[in-house]
Structures are given as C-alpha cells and as structure tokens.
Amino acid sequence: MVAVQTGETVTIVRGDEELLARTASLFATATEISCAANDLGTWTLTHGSADLDELARTRRDDVRVRKVYRPGVLLDPASAQGLVRVQEVHGAQIRITPDELNETILFDRRVAILAGDVHAGRRSYSVVTQPETVQGVTSLFEAVWRSATDLAVYDARTAELRQLAPQVLDLLVQGCKDETAARRLGLGVRTYRRRVAELMAALGAESRFQAGVRARELGLV
C-alpha cells in the first residue's frame, strides 16, 4: 500500500487503481469524510470496491460521511438505487444541490482529492495536503452543504419529474414541438414547459440541447 506523503503539497495520480493505492489508508483511519460529485461515476472507488465496502460497514459508527450530488443522479433509477446503497453501506448523510460542484473528497479537513479530466479512459486526480488550500476547499464544501437539500426531501419533491424524465428526454431528442409533446404526455403546454425547465435544472443544462447531451452522458437516453 502506498500512503500519501504529507510532505508533498500536491500529488497527481491517474486512474482509480493508483488513487485507491494512495488513499486506502485515509479511508481506514479518517473520522470525517466529505464528498461532492456530479454523479456516481466520478468516485467509483468509494462505492465500487468490495474491500472499501467491508471497511465502511465495520467503521460506519466511527466515521461521519457526508455526500453532495447534483439532481441528475436521481433521474436514473440505477443511480437512485446506488444512493440508497451508499446510505446503507457508509451510513452517509446525502444532500442534493443544483449548483455547480467541484468534485472533491475531503479527509478530516486535512487532505483533499480533486477530480480532474479523463484522458485515454483514465481520470486524473490531485491529492492536496497543503493546509491553506485544503481549508479553502473545505470552506467551499461547507457552503454547498449548508445550501443543499436533504436527499429524502429532494426526492419527494421530484418524484413526478423522475417518472416523466425518460419520456420528456425522448421527446426532446426527437425534437417534438411543445404542443405535440404535451399532448403525448397528457399535460398542458405550460405544465410540460415547466417540467422541461425542471429537468434542465436537474441536469445542470442551460439549453434543451445541453440537456440532451447531458442525458446521453448519464445514460438516460
């Protein structure tokens, strides 16, 4: 196992395997873990490793785990079920925010991992131990956490939208006019347009075209 060297201020790692090798000791010893992500795809190491899942089960009473996600994660039934699993395995508090997120994991407010871009199928990550930088990232996370909505509350608010999302996205991809789409769904035009606006917000999209692109990225269409 390769531990993070605290003398280094920033270490760049590439791929989940290398990241896990460098941070496994942090998951084993941290008493507070905070995570921000757009969806479940970025931090696959936190919910895709059998070893970490077992460790999380044995330590769930000793660790405070907080996670913030974008609303799009609730639109996909598989992702929504994944959130339930995160709660069960990690005992995590989960909140939802429509705001832009810097995808981050924080360990005990002393180590921050920042997700980078994907190249050749592998994502790069910055492991940061410089105290002032970590404090700044922590402050950003806390601000997002305070303004975010508890998962159960947000889920109840968007239950109807989640049911309609696949049909609405399909109609958007087809390029249907609002009047036609509303008629197919048995909705009034104003109601349909409101649902489209809510869906765009959930996907973090500024246009219907962006909503379609984001939906494809999430595998919703």
Image (cartoon, helix red, strand yellow):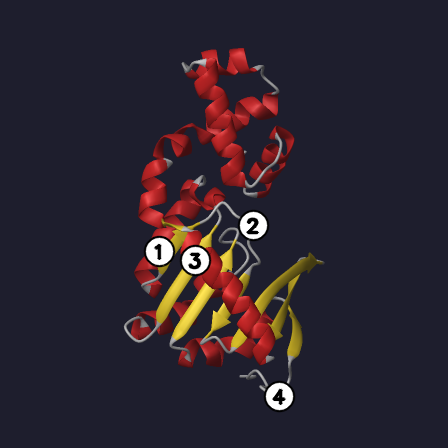
**Numbered disc total:** 4
Residue 57's place in the image compared with 2, above or below, is above
Q: Give the CA separation, mark 2 to mark 3.
A: 12 Å
Q: Specify which label sits upstream in the sequence, 2 or 3.
A: 2
The circle on residue 7 is 4
Circle 1 or circle 3, nearest the eye: 3
Residue at the spot x=56%, y=59% of the render?
103
Question: In this view of the protein, can residue 141 be seen by the observer?
Answer: yes
3D distance between C-alphas at marks 2 and 1: 24 Å
| Nearer-N-terminus badge (3/4) | 4
Place residue 90 in its image quadrant. bottom left
Label placed on residue 145 = 3
Question: Which comes before the other along the chain, label 4 or label 2?
Answer: 4
Q: Are marks 3 and 4 in contact (CB under 8 Å)?
A: no
Residue 171 in which image quadrant:
top right
Query: How packed is label 4: few (under 14 Cα within 10 Å), some, or many (20 or more)?
Result: few
Q: What x and y, as percent, mark residue 184?
A: 46, 13
For the residue carrying disc 2, how many other residues have a C-alpha within 10 Å: few (<14), some (14-19), or many (20+)? Answer: few
Q: Is residue 120 left or right of residue 115?
A: right
Q: Which residue is mark 2?
A: 100
Instruction: Quickly name the residue at label 1.
Output: 85
Instruction: Report the front residue among 156 and 170.
Output: 156
Secondary structure under tag 3 reads: helix
Few, some or many C-alpha atoms within 10 Å of disc 1 (few <14, some 14-19, many ≥20)?
Answer: some
Residue 170: percent from the left, percent from the top? 54, 26
Frontmost of labels 3 and 4 is: 3
Three-letter code for the amino acid on which mark 4 is drawn: Gly
Under circle 1, the secondary element is: helix
